Image (cartoon, rainbow, N blue to C red):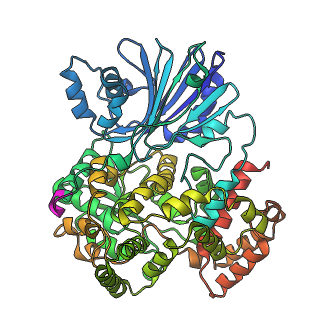
């Protein structure tokens, strides 16, 4: 796991070393172990390294092919690099290192762009052909590893971290108000190729690009224009025939992600997903000397899952705990904002931040359950999509049965409410979300409501079946979770790996019949059945969905936060931005304090958005 950066001068001017160094310094936390750069003519590549595979100097980047023609900077891991290396050896290629980076260089020479479909992993890389002066870049299927860029005038800047780009941008960046609107109204970010900065875009997941830097090349060949190389809808495979088949492939996905020359641990929340990873490590790989890392808050506190985590006591050798609270959140707020760089819509990101901080110094690689909710219908609003589909198909008997089981299991109307919401016209869905928030400044709402809501309201919320909803979550929703995890882990120089996003697992899971996903009012049916006999039963049959949630509702009622939030809403800078109607926000906060409602998610967004403006947008 590392960080890459680059500068391209489209009019042929040579790239100087100083700005490349500045880009590397800005993301040094991503790679504290080594660094390197390459500058030749109008292109410069920078790299910072977190050593995971082949810890020797042989893993240094930028890395060159044996003949010196190709040079690469690469962030991520190709987990099946051993198998690919052996296949390439049969074709006559030789290897000098034990790295997956060298495997990419060799694969490029044999298969070219088609190599991407052979990779099982997470990556963002650029590979430069010094002979033809052609640059090729690509990002992994689902967006686990980041790639940001800006193209203006005669240069292109790119990197793993936005701050690498802004370090040499030459001015304060401009806020993307469309992104801010969707962040506040829908709790969504990263639904397209934009960021919170107008100047910076991201290479979409499953996309690549090719640039010709030779002087005289046609204009269109000198522009960074992403091209899709992976389309999930076209790559769905035969569904699993049984829970046992699912478990076998899931265990294989976990096993591949154990490949490392440094210690590996697990983020253990106590939920079904992370607990399944731990159970497979214990049962299939006999990892008795395992380190797990968890956030707990005390019995009875919202978000505390210690009762379930403790079920692994006596099985896991080293269980580590962190206890975030209101005081620690206030103390860490500035650093968390620096780590994330863009606003995040939930304080659950803070719980993850604390888990990563806890793990730093004990392990270098962490396995995590990210992606399981999107592939296996883990969020309870997926019942809304399912009910909507059954109703549209007039499967009244199945609909009545599933509703009855849902109500019996969860004693909640949430699934029914989401069914109604997803059945509304797109414009009504947008209006409903804004009315639910109730604090957006009217001018801000009217300026941006019709701009970015289309993907969220039309595509994500407009899915007509459960399968379509799951695929759309991979397209438009999953990536912001992966981004937050990447930034939290890399802030502490850790690599996070996500077995549930092994493409072999995803492509067969999303082909499953609905009843293998949601069944008799329960989520993740095939995973629950696959882990029967492996997982502790109280975890396997859990009905609630928590994740890395925090007791933020109570935190924001503490005296310290009351003072902080009141001063924030009364500040001149907050009103000046014209994003939030401060009088309405103050009214909602008073309702929160008097327990006439829980507005903690909105309060958190007010806080973190302000921190972001102050740190990165507004001149001090």
- Image location (x, y in percent) of residue 193: 56, 46
Q: How many marks?
A: 0
Give the left or right position of residue 25, taking residue 575 as reference.
left
Give the left or right position of residue 291, taking residue 186 as reference.
left
Extent of the magenta region: 240-245
Residue 56 visible to an observer of this rendering: no
Name the residue located 41 percent from the left edge and 62 percent from the top edge: 469
- Image location (x, y in percent) of residue 498: 36, 52
Asked if residue 244 lies in the magenta stretch, the reply is yes
Give the left or right position of residue 328, taking residue 606 as reference.
left
Q: Nearer the viewer, residue 238 or 155?
A: 238
Name the residue located 29 percent from the left edge and 20 percent from the top edge: 96
Q: Nearer the viewer, residue 376 or 586?
A: 376
**Quadrant containing the N terminus in the rendered view:** top left
- Image location (x, y in percent) of residue 118: 29, 35
Name the residue located 57 percent from the left edge and 33 percent from the top edge: 158
Asked if residue 218 lies in the magenta stretch, the reply is no
């Amino acid at each position: 796991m590392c960080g890459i950066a680059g500068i391209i001068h489209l009019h042929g001017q040579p790239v100087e070393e100083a700005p490349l160094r500045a880009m590397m310094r800005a993301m040094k936390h991503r790679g504290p172990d080594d660094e390197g750069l390459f500058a030749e003519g109008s292109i410069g590549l920078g790299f910072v390294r977190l050593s995971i595979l082949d810890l020797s100097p042989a893993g240094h980047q930028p890395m060159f092919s044996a003949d010196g023609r190709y040079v690469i900077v690469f962030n991520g891991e190709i987990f099946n690099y051993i198998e690919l290396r052996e296949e390439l050896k049969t074709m006559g290629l030789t290897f000098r290192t034990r790295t997956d980076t060298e495997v990419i260089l060799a694969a490029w020479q044999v298969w070219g762009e088609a190599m991407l479909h052979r990779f099982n992993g997470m990556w963002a890389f650029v590979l430069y052909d010094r002979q033809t002066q052609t640059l090729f870049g690509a990002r992994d299927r689902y967006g686990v590893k980041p790639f940001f860029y800006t193209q203006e005038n005669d240069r292109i800047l790119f990197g793993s971290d936005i701050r690498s780009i802004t370090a040499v941008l030459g001015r304060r960046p401009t806020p993307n108000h469309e992104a801010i609107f969707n962040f506040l109204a829908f709790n969504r970010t990263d639904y397209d190729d934009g960021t919170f900065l107008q100047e910076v875009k991201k290479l979409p997941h499953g996309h690549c690009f090719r640039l010709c830097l030779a002087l005289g090349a046609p204009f269109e060949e000198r522009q960074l224009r992403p091209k899709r190389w992976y389309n999930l809808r076209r790559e769905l495979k035969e569904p699993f025939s049984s829970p046992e088949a699912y478990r076998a492939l899931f265990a294989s996905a976990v096993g591949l992600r154990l490949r490392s020359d440094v210690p590996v641990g697990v983020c253990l929340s106590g939920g079904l997903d992370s607990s399944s990873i731990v159970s497979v490590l214990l049962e299939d790989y006999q990892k008795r000397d395992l380190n797990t890392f968890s956030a707990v808050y005390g019995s009875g506190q919202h978000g505390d899952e210690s009762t379930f985590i403790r079920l692994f006591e006596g099985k896991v050798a080293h269980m580590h705990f962190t206890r975030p609270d209101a005081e620690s959140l206030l103390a860490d707020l500035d650093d968390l904002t620096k780590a994330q760089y863009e606003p995040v819509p939930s304080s659950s990101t803070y719980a993850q931040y604390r888990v990563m901080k806890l793990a730093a110094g004990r392990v270098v690689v962490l396995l995590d359950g990210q992606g399981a909710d999107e592939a296996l219908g883990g969020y309870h609003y997926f019942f809304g999509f399912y009910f909507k589909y059954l109703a549209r198909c007039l499967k009244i008997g199945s609909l009545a049965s599933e509703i009855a089981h849902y109500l019996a299991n969860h004693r909640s109307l949430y699934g029914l409410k989401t069914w109604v919401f997803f059945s509304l016209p797109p414009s009504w869905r947008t209006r409903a979300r804004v009315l639910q928030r109730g604090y957006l400044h009217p001018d801000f709402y009217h300026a941006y409501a019709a701009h970015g809501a289309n993907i969220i309201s039309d595509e994500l919320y407009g899915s007509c079946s459960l399968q379509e909803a799951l695929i759309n979550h991979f397209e438009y929703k999953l990536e912001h979770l992966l981004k937050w995890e990447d930034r939290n882990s890399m802030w502490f120089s850790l690599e996070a790996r996500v077995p549930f996003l092994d493409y072999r697992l995803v492509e067969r899971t999303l082909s499953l019949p609905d009843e293998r996903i949601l069944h008799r009012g329960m989520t993740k049916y095939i995973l629950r059945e696959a882990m029967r006999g492996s997982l502790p039963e109280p975890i396997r049959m859990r009905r609630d969905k928590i994740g890395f949630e925090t007791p933020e509702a109570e935190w924001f009622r503490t005296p310290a936060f009351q003072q902080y939030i009141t001063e924030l809403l009364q500040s001149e800078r907050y009103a000046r931005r014209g994003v939030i109607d401060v009088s309405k926000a103050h009214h909602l906060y008073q309702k929160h304090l008097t327990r006439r409602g829980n507005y903690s998610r909105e309060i958190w967004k007010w806080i973190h958005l302000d921190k972001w403006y102050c740190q990165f947008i507004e001149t001090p």
